[in-house]
Image (cartoon, rainbow, N blue to C red):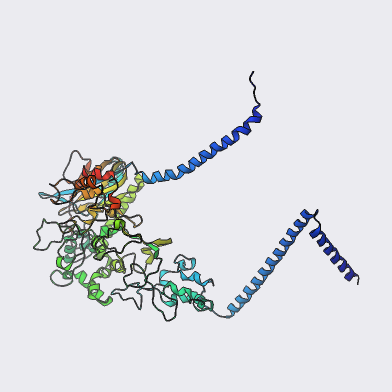
Amino acid sequence: MKTRFPTSTRVPFLQRPKRNIVAGAILGFSFLLFPLYFFLAAQTPPASRGVIRLKVRYKSGDSPKDLARKRFFLIKGTLEENKSLIERIKQTDPMSRECYYLGKGASPALIRWLDDNDCDSVYCREIEEKYLSGNEAVPEFQAAYNQGLRDFKTPELARRWLTVNLAADIRDGFYNQKQRTIADLISLAEAATKTKVMSVMTDRKGTAYLTDIEAGTYTISNLVGSKTEKTSILWTCEKDVKAGNLAIAMRPLILSNEKDPKAKCEFVERPLPICEHTK
Amino acid sequence: MVTHQTKRKVAQRISQRAQRILLCVPLRPLRSKLLVKCCLACFLVLVAASGAVVLAVAQTRQKRRASRPSTQQQAPKGSAAKYSGFLHSSEKHKSLTCNACHKLPTSGAAKRDFPDVADFPNHDACVRCHRQQFFTRQAFMGTGPAICTVCHVRAAPREDGRFNFGKPNIAGLAMKTKDERQFTIEFPHDKHQNVIASSRPRRSSNQAAGFIRASFFQPEPADDKKPDYNNCSICHVTRKQAIGAPPAGWPGSFVPPAGTFKTQPHTHDACFDCHWKGQKPTSDDCAGCHKASASFVPTDWPTRKSAKFLHEGGGEGGHVLECTSCHINITRASTLRGLAPDVPIAMCASCHNDNKKVTWKKIVSLTDEFAQLKKTGNCTYCHTSEVGKKKPPASHDAAVQ
């Protein structure tokens, strides 16, 4: 005959400490796991991020050239998904630099100075002394320099700080106008895709890297036509991004003004407009 | 008479009761309760009395002050030591505009060839609110008014030596022992890259049209025809002087030679040449670039995994790629926060791989370095031993494949 002890007397006495030990162990373990989670989160590289290597080139005459120092934008979604946005991008046709500056009554010397280095504003390169006097002198620079001589201690400072005495339109009016157009298109893209638009600029070899991007399909565009020698080229391309690092992404996405049936890329090439002196 | 007797009786009763309370052991619980009550009552009376005294004193002082006409707001009187440290973030200071204290350009001692904010504000900026901290008897006790040491090396009327204003210390002035900043600097590289972007080389008449040679270097008179593609050298030129060691010493005891690092802009000149007026943020808008930090921000030392990398190195007269070819994320950086001069190994591999056909003939390749690692357990070409002895990350393997 088995003796059965009344549970009411034995359970609280024997099981309560056990339960406490188990609860304590769970609590302690969770305390250990909590920082461990953060440690691991910080250590583990995000597995779902990828890289795009861009290579932008264009054919002008017979020779292919790299498109240097132009900004490209990464918009979430396929070309199809961004169809209306792309239409809007294609319709946007900002004024050319030459037309803008002619419209503002800029001197031919200034327009030539800007064009020499494909500069959208006067900030893009140093204004050397030869542009202040002599054959290559730029009248706008001369006037600002003379003002600087009155404002500042030394002629060298007047030259180095020359841009502060230039009229805003001449200084960076075209650049600002172009940036406003781009900003409007970015706002549209961000509103449509609910994702921030990332951008990167090509180096002198026309190469750029878009790093640390979420895997998925993207539209890559320069949003406004990039000026080349004779034309302006607008690209809208699609790229499927898979998780991976730079070493894997070394095969570039090539943007060109030559048709490639393999690439999901569209380009619009327009001849540069002929402008007239309006002012 | 009756009243006098009654009073005496009451007093007797009280003393008897007190004796009972104090001496009678069986009544101890009752006695301690009463004691506590008494103490509490006494304490409350004391607090009320001292409060009344403080109020009365304060009122009399206010009356005295009101009788003296004063147009200037005075800072509260506090311990002198409290005023030895200046906080831009204090409520009073925050309520002022920058130019309430900082005048542009700074007059007086700052010897710069350009108009600049290069020195501490004048005495008036401090004295108009902190008269008490400067001139009271308390302020002159001990080593002198502590408030002076906000700017001055010593708090003595004839000592006008001041600490360095701003960083780095180009004027050779004394530095505060705790060199921390109250501001962070905002600088969007992306916007600046847009405006300084220059895509075609400058061509002189005797330069071959197709020849391209990128430059990391500041244009020098002897080599002024060197094209400068993306103009990073407007702000970052090769640091010709050796850099001072970090507080913890150089990792692996490797002292980087001059030319290892690039400079960063350290005077307002680098900004004012465009932002003096007209171009926002203009020189009078301090907050356009300087963002107040909630806590002091310690200055950072440059950290490099490849401590031995030389911008000026490369055997053929310098590394030939332009800055953004290696610093691939710089053209998208809209802030300096979290910005690192990151150069992925894949960028190094674009020249330093094992394919001799496409790279320089005598270049040290990553494959050579891997072979060395097998032999010596240390990668020494780019790294100091602290990094070089570690297992190379997967990116290094991937870069040579």
Asked which quadrant contains residue A150, the reply is bottom left
The x and y percentages for residue B64 are 60, 79
Q: Report the side of B86 relative to B353 (left or right).
A: right
Q: Residue furthest bottom?
A: B158
Q: Residue at x 11, y 56 (%)?
A: B211
**Residue A183 can be seen, yes or no:** yes
Residue A107 at x, y = what percent? Answer: 18, 66
Is residue B129 depicted above or below B200 in this figure?
A: below
Quadrant that contains the N terminus of chain B: bottom right
Farthest residue toward the front?
A: B376
A44 or B250, which is in the foreground? Answer: B250
Q: Nearer the viewer, residue B366 or B357?
A: B366
Residue B264 on image: x %, y %: 29, 63
**Residue A127, x across and y down, in percent:** 20, 67
Residue drawn at (18%, 66%) of the image: B220
Looking at the image, residue B152 lies above or below residue B193: below
Q: Relative to A238, is B383 above or below?
A: below
Specify whether A191 is left or right of B201.
right
Residue A93 showing in the rendered view: no
Q: Give residue B3's quadrant in the image.
A: bottom right
